[in-house]
Amino acid sequence: MAIEIERKFLVVGDAWRAEVSRAVEMRQGYLTQEAGRASVRVRIAGAQATLNIKAAVVGSVRAEYEYAIPLADARELLDTLCVGKLEKIRHYIVYPVSDPGARQDVTWEIDEFLGDNAGLVIAEIELAAVDRPFVRPAWLGRELTFDRRYYNHHLALHPFRSWGGDAS
Amino acid sequence: MAIEIERKFLVVGDAWRAEVSRAVEMRQGYLTQEAGRASVRVRIAGAQATLNIKAAVVGSVRAEYEYAIPLADARELLDTLCVGKLEKIRHYIVYPVSDPGARQDVTWEIDEFLGDNAGLVIAEIELAAVDRPFVRPAWLGRELTFDRRYYNHHLALHPFRSWGGDAS
C-alpha cells in the first residue's frame, strides 16, 4: 500500500499552459458505484494501463494500491464493465527546488477534463507530509481537497456539465 | 480476458471427502457492493493473493480477469477496504480421463464454506464449452449455476446462515 497525500485546487485562467513540460491523454473508468469503502479504477495513460484501488474517504490522505495490467484488458474493462468513465489530458508542470528546505522538485499535475467534464481544470500536488509548505502558483484557485464533488470517481458518475456549470 | 465457463451444484452428504486429493484455505472479500456490472474480489489462497474482476451476470459463462498481487496488499485490502468477506476450504477432486471423447482430466472444486456460511458445500466444474457433457458424481445435488444467491459475492454480503438454513 502507498499512502497518497495530495491537495487539489481549481485552476484559474490559461497562464499555466505556458509552463507545461509534458502531457499525456488519460482514459479511465470505475468498477465501483458510489457507495462502498473503495473506488476501483481502470486507467489508460498513453500506452500504460493500471488498476487502482483507493479508499473512498474525503481528504488529503488516502490509502492507495496500484497495479499494472495489460493494455488489452484495460480496453475491454473500459468498454464492457466500467460504470463511470472520463477522459482528460494530464499536463505536468515542474518547478525546480527553490527554497533551501525543499529536497526535491515540485510537480503539479494539471488535469484538463474532456467530454462531459469539459470546462473543468484541476491542479494536484503530491506532498511528503500533509502540512508541508509549497509555493502557490499565480494560476491556483480555491482548494478542492475536501470537496467530494471534484473527485474523479464522482466526476465519472456525475459529470461537471450536469451540475449546470457551477464550479464555485 | 478469460471466459469462464462453469457449472455449480450443491453437494449432498460426505462421501466426496474420500476422493479429495488436495485442499487449500481461502479467504476472500469484495471491493464492490451488490449493484454494478462487475464484482472485484481480493483472495488469499494459501500463500498466493489475487485480484479478480468478474462480470456480474448470472449463468455459466462469465468474463473474468485475474491478477496476482502482493500478499501484504491483499491482507490490508481484506482488513480495511473489503465490504463482504468469506472463508472456505477448497477441496480438489480429480477424475482421470475416462470416456474416449474426453481430452483431459476432470477437476471438481468443492468449496466447504466456513464462518457465517458454514453448512454450505458447493461443487464447481470448469468446462471447455457450455454444452460439454460430464460424468455426475453420486454426491452431486441440484444445480446452482443460475441461482444468484449462491454466488460467492452474494454469500459474502448475505451469508447462508442469515437465510434461515434454507438451501433448497
Image (spheres, coloured by chain):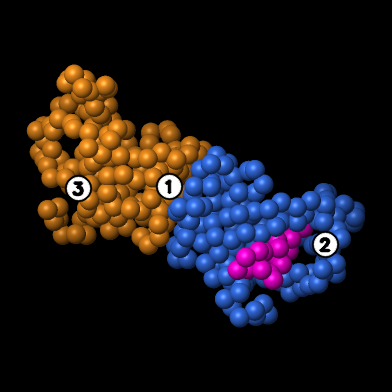
Chain colours: A orange, B blue
Determine the image quadrant of residue A133: top left
The residue wearing badge 2 is: B17
**Is residue A63 depicted above or below B132 in this figure?**
above
Whether the magenta-drawn stretch holds residue B113 is answered as: yes
Where's the N terminus of chain A, which quadrant? top left
Q: Is residue A151 a member of the stretch shown in magenta? A: no
Residue at x 30% of width, y 49% of height: A152
* Same chain letter for marks 3 and 2: no
Q: Nearer the viewer, residue B49 or B62?
A: B49
Q: Residue at x 53, y 47 (%)?
A: B75
Q: At x 18% / y 19%, what residue is drawn?
A: A100
Q: Residues within 10 Å of mark 1 (few under 14, many from 20)?
A: many
**CB-based contact (under 8 Å), mark 3 and mark 2:** no
On whether disc 1 and disc 3 are found on a single subunit, the reply is yes
Three-letter residue code for mark 1: Ile
| Structural distance between the alpha carbons of marks 1 and 3 | 21 Å
Q: Amino acid at mark 2?
A: Arg
- Which disc is residue A53 wearing? 1
Secondary structure under badge 1? Answer: strand
Query: Disc 2 to disc 1, how far (Cα)?
Result: 38 Å
Can see residue A2?
A: yes
Vertical relation: B112 (above or below) B104: below
Whether A18 is drawn above or below B93: the answer is: above
In which image quadrant can residue B132 be found?
bottom right
- Residue A62 drawn at (x, y percent): 34, 46
Chain of the residue where label 3 is placed in the rendered structure: A
Q: Amino acid at mark 3?
A: Leu
Q: Nearer the viewer, mark 3 or mark 2?
A: 2
Query: Is label 3 in a helix, a strand or a loop?
Result: loop
Rendering coords of residue B92 (x, y %): 77, 54
